[in-house]
Every structure is written in structure tokens, then in C-alpha cells.
Image (cartoon, helix red, strand yellow):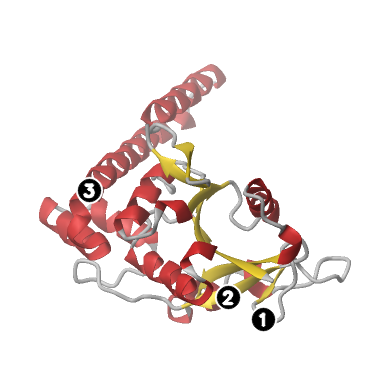
């Protein structure tokens, strides 16, 4: 049976720790069979980077563009089945394996972070097995089950600090002076940090602008009339729309989907 391995996630931002997990999967299942699946969702302030921006981060870190795809739901089998069939593949003769960080599988007890409940593999309400199952050497087709295999967590300092999640990286960057910004990006992207810096500067500045605007609006809502509240909410919605970046476009390249900004 053929195997497709997928490393899915939000990746705000995608960095070299994620790249290490992808490459670990590729070493086991083969690069041509391994894909980085980027959640297409972009929403300020928690998910500030577009899928196109995250694809650029991955490209800088050596992920081939042919292996980068965008998905609506990273763990929805139908999207992968549809993509495989579009390329002439056979879902009934192909197993689907998801790579998941040990941090998500096991949690981080010292930080009171529990395991992700999606990977408890509890039966469905009718008692039948859930779609996702632990990885095994005996695989069934992707139409029946998807399998989860854990990847090692690549620990590395970021500007001399230990940062275990994307929000810590974003917070450190937005509060840093230019010298520390460069130190953060060098640790995340190496010598090509300068290609990613404009993305961080643009998106995280937008992020802060939205948060500042929200904090200014909130006190006004308390004593506002219904009409005033409506106007304030409309103003906030308009501001968010204006601050949103250009959405990524999905284009074809060698029969594979990859992301590119226009």
C-alpha cells in the first residue's frame, strides 16, 4: 500500500523546529510522499500570517514548494482524498499518516499544557473506532482511517530565550528592538532571515494596530447607546477588513499545489 505523510498545522509562524519535524517525516516516508499542509485560516490577531507568507517561511527553510499545500481543515480526510484523486491516485490503495509533535501528543506537564484531545483516539458515540488512529505497520486505506505518528520536538534557543510556542515568538518580536528582532529571525530562519523580516514587520505591526484599536473601542461600549454600539462595531469591522493582507492564491506547479502571493 502507498503511504502519504502529512505534517499539518497553523504555523504562526512556521520556523525551523517545524521544518525539522517535516524532514523527520520525509526521512521515514520519502520526500515525494510527504506534504506540509498549511491551514488556510488567517485571522487577526491570533493567526496573523497568510498561508502564502507561511509558505515563504517554509521555502526559506528548505521545504520544496511541490510539497506545500493549503487545506481548510488539516485533519479532514476528504480534502486529501480529493487532492489525490485529482492527481490520478487511488485512495483505496493509499494510507494517510499525520505527523504530530510530541508536545501536542503528550502535552507539556511543567507548563500545565495537556495533550491535545484530538489524539486520545476515543471511539465514536456509536462505539466504532475514530477516524484517527495511532500509527501502526498494518495500515488501512485513507478512506477508512488516518494514522498519527509523533515527531520529535526540536528545542533551540530564540534570541537567548526558550520559546516553546508560536505566541511566545510573536510576543517577543513585537516587543523587541531592531537588534533583537534580527536575533530572533536568525535563530528561526538562519542566514535568510532578511527575506522573512518584512513579513514579520508588516503582519505583527498590523496585529498590534488592531489590538490597540480594540482596546480604545472597549471603554466606549459600556455607556454607548444601541445605535452607537452598532456604529462602533461597524467601524471595528471596517478597520479589520482594511488591515487584512492580500489573500494567497493557489496556483499549479508540476501537478502540485503551492502557495504564492500576488
Q: Earlier in the sequence, mark 1 or mark 3?
A: 1
Helix, strand or loop under label 3? helix
- Residue at the (87%, 71%) spot, across then down: 127
Label 3 sits on residue:
195
Helix, strand or loop under label 1? loop
Q: Quadrant of the C terminus?
A: top left
The one of 194 and 91 positioned closer to us in this rendering:
91
Q: Quadrant of the N terminus?
A: bottom right
Asked if residue 50 can be seen in this view, the reply is: no
**Label 2–label 1 contact, CB within 8 A:** no
| 190 horizontally vs 3: left or right | left
Q: Position of residue 96 (x, y in %)?
A: 65, 65
Label 1 sits on residue:
136
Label 3: how many Cα within 10 Å (few below 14, some 14–19, many 20+): some
Label 2: how many Cα within 10 Å (few below 14, some 14–19, many 20+): some
Q: Earlier in the sequence, mark 2 or mark 3?
A: 2
- Residue at the (47%, 66%) spot, across then down: 31
In the picture shown, does residue 94 fall above or below 84?
Answer: below
In the picture shown, does residue 33 fall above or below 44?
Answer: below
Label 2 sits on residue:
149
**Label 2–label 3 contact, CB within 8 A:** no
In the picture shown, does residue 230 fall above or below 121?
Answer: above
Which residue is farthest right?
126
**Label 1–label 3 contact, CB within 8 A:** no
| 82 horizontally vs 239: left or right | right
Measure how far apart labels 2 and 3 are at the Cα level.
32 Å
Helix, strand or loop under label 2? strand
* Picture quadrant where residue 18 is located: bottom left
The one of 166 and 71 positioned closer to us in this rendering:
71
- Residue at the (23%, 43%) spot, across then down: 198
Amino acid at each position: 500500500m502507498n503511504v502519504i505523510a502529512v505534517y499539518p498545522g497553523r504555523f504562526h509562524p512556521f520556523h525551523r523546529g517545524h521544518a525539522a519535524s517535516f524532514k523527520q517525516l520525509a526521512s521515514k516516508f520519502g520526500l515525494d510522499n510527504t506534504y506540509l499542509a498549511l491551514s488556510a485560516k488567517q485571522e487577526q490577531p491570533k493567526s496573523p500570517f497568510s498561508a502564502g507568507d507561511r509558505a515563504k517561511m517554509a521555502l526559506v527553510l528548505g521545504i520544496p514548494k511541490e510539497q506545500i499545500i493549503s487545506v481548510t481543515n488539516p485533519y479532514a480526510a476528504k480534502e486529501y482524498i480529493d487532492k489525490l484523486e485529482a492527481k490520478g491516485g487511488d485512495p483505496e490503495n493509499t494510507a494517510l499518516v499525520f505527523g504530530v509533535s510530541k508536545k501536542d501528543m503528550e502535552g507539556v506537564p511543567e507548563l500545565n499544557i495537556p495533550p491535545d484531545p484530538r489524539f486520545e483516539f476515543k471511539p465514536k458515540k456509536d462505539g466504532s473506532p475514530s477516524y484517527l488512529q495511532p500509527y501502526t505497520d498494518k495500515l488501512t486505506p485513507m478512506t477508512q482511517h488516518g494514522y498519527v505518528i509523533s515527531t520529535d520536538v526540536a528545542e533551540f534557543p530564540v534570541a537567548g530565550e526558550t520559546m516553546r510556542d508560536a505566541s511566545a515568538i510573536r510576543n517577543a518580536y513585537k516587543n523587541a528592538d531592531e537588534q533583537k528582532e534580527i536575533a530572533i529571525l536568525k535563530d528561526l530562519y538562519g542566514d535568510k532571515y532578511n527575506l522573512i523580516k518584512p513579513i514579520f514587520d508588516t503582519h505583527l505591526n498590523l496585529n498590534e494596530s488592531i489590538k490597540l484599536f480594540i482596546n480604545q473601542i472597549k471603554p466606549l461600549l459600556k455607556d454607548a447607546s444601541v445605535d452607537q454600539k452598532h456604529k462602533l462595531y461597524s467601524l471595528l469591522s471596517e478597520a479589520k477588513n482594511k488591515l487584512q493582507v492580500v489573500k494567497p492564491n493557489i496556483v499549479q506547479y508540476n501537478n502540485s499545489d503551492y502557495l504564492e502571493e500576488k
